Amino acid sequence: MVGLVRLLGIRFLTWLNSLGRATVLWANAMWWLPRWEGVRLIVTQIYYVGFLSLVIIVLSAFSIGAVLALQFYTQLARFGAEDAVGVGLALVVLRELGPVVTALLFAGRAGSALTAEIGLMKTTEQLSSMEMMGVDPLKRIIAPRIWAGLISVPILTAIFNTVAIYGGVVVGVNWLGADPGGFWSGMQEGVEIYEDLVKGMIKSAVFALLVTWVAVFQGYDAPPTAEGMSLATTRTVVISSVLILATDFLMTLVFYGDF
Amino acid sequence: MQASEHLIEIRDLSFRRGDRVIFDGADFDIPRGRITAIMGPSGTGKTTLLKIIGGQVKPDAGQVYVEGQDICSMNRDELFAFRRNLGMMFQSSALFTDLSVYENVAFPMRVHTNLSEELIRDLVMMKLNAVGLRGARDLAPSQLSGGMARRVALARAIALDPDLIMYDEPFTGQDPIAMGVLVGLIKELNSALNITSLLVSHDIHETVSIADQIFVIADGKVIGAGTPEELRAAPTPMVRQFMHGEPDGPVPFHYPADDIEFDVLGEAG
């Protein structure tokens, strides 16, 4: 019993310790406004984390939109409510699936890559040598990557939303034959800018913050060994995914909860 | 301020990592404009000493003065400003793998100066020429041999003409030719640029051939200091063991362990 309490205590303190170090890392990196030089670095990183994630985002968005339309259509057609496919699809995508799936894909595609890159830079003493040159790696390496993530994820989410709805149109309207007029007007009536679109984008910004934070910290904090690296990349994906899903529930509760 | 004879003065340095004592009241005076070597068996904290001087590691106690400034009391910004006067060549070379040889050497200039592109180009060519790798400017770090990578790292370390350059195990793992080249370069750069060179190594032959002054450290203390000749004739057995490369002596061959009878024969023994 004492052993169990002690184990829990140690676990908790280790966790608290990492959280503290992660916060200091983030604060030190972001306590700095990007200058011209920084903008160039951020744009380069947006290419790596954002642009290179486009393929997986677009493909996933299209299939998710298509699957949703298919499921909605078969269920709604039983009540002759095929017109509601549009609004149902749009609400599910804008409020939940767009931000959540984009963030999950981003964590798997870009977050793990960030962790591995930063971890290897640390292992090969590149970060250390940069420090010795009088260049702060937090500002030069970490900060541009965090900014790039913060900028990319909401844009990727917007792209995901668009493509997913287009996928729904292809399946629901073009293939299964829902009435395009009803499809679009239902969507137009049912979707509100602030309530659905903006709140979804707020979610995606929060996810972006969480994923990039976890990814750069895991890389920066990884022990310089092969096991350390593999553990860190795995952790990035696992921790970010859990955080995304948990905070999504919380935010949905706050945004749409009825109390 | 009057420039003192010593660029670096370290007083009463103590540092421990976990339970292990790395330094226990060590003093160093590193003379200006000369080549000073810190020698000692592996794991005695030679690299740690360089990291302490560079401000990457904070000692538990003691003062570290470089140019009369106390490194330990600097804040983050002051440290980064201070390091611009410092070049370091890492054991792993630590080149930026996403940049070409040219860009690696240009990196410190681009970050710390507002020089025009042409001027940077000329400077990079001069630095690369000094290490004999002007022709390798377009190669990626992954295309370099270990010796070439270290020479590029050296060119990068002198990019901003620092006052102090630190070498972490520059000879380890090099073939004889590369070793000879590096020995020549370190000596040449030291006299040509009038830099203070601090070199950490356990390759006795090469180090003795270039160092003006040597510190031998063991068990967290300086156990011998002086010119190479003085140390060769050193009276203390530990320094002699090290300088002559004897496998056993005051520095034991065996890692501390129980009696071998106990380990081999077990409880029955």
Image: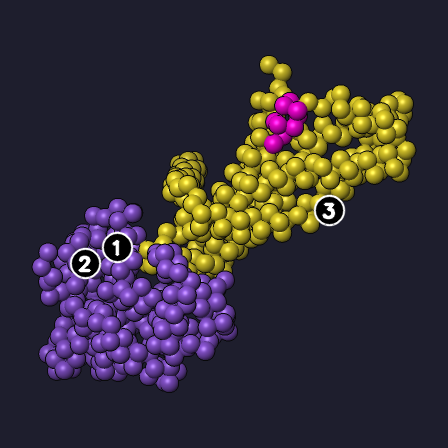
Chain colours: A yellow, B purple
SS for tag 2?
A: strand
Q: Which residue is mark 1?
A: B82
Q: Mark on residue A67? A: none
The CA distance from mark 2 to mark 1 is 9 Å
The residue at 58%/43% (across/down) is A152
> Mark 1: few, some, or many residues within 10 Å (few <14, many ≥20)?
some
The CA distance from mark 1 to mark 3 is 50 Å
Q: Is residue A29 above or below residue A200?
A: below
Q: Mark on residue B66? A: 2
The residue at 37%/77% (across/down) is B129
Membership of A78 in magenta stretch: no
* Chain at tag 2: B
Q: Residue furthest top?
A: A259
Range of residues picked out in magenta = A193-201
Q: Nearer the viewer, residue A17 or A41?
A: A41
The residue at 64%/22% (across/down) is A195
Q: Position of residue B18 (x, y in %)?
A: 29, 53
- The prevailing secondary structure element of the residues shown in magenta is helix
Q: Which residue is mark 3?
A: A59
SS for tag 1?
A: helix
Q: CB under 8 Å between callouts 2 and 1? A: yes
Q: Amino acid at mark 1?
A: Phe
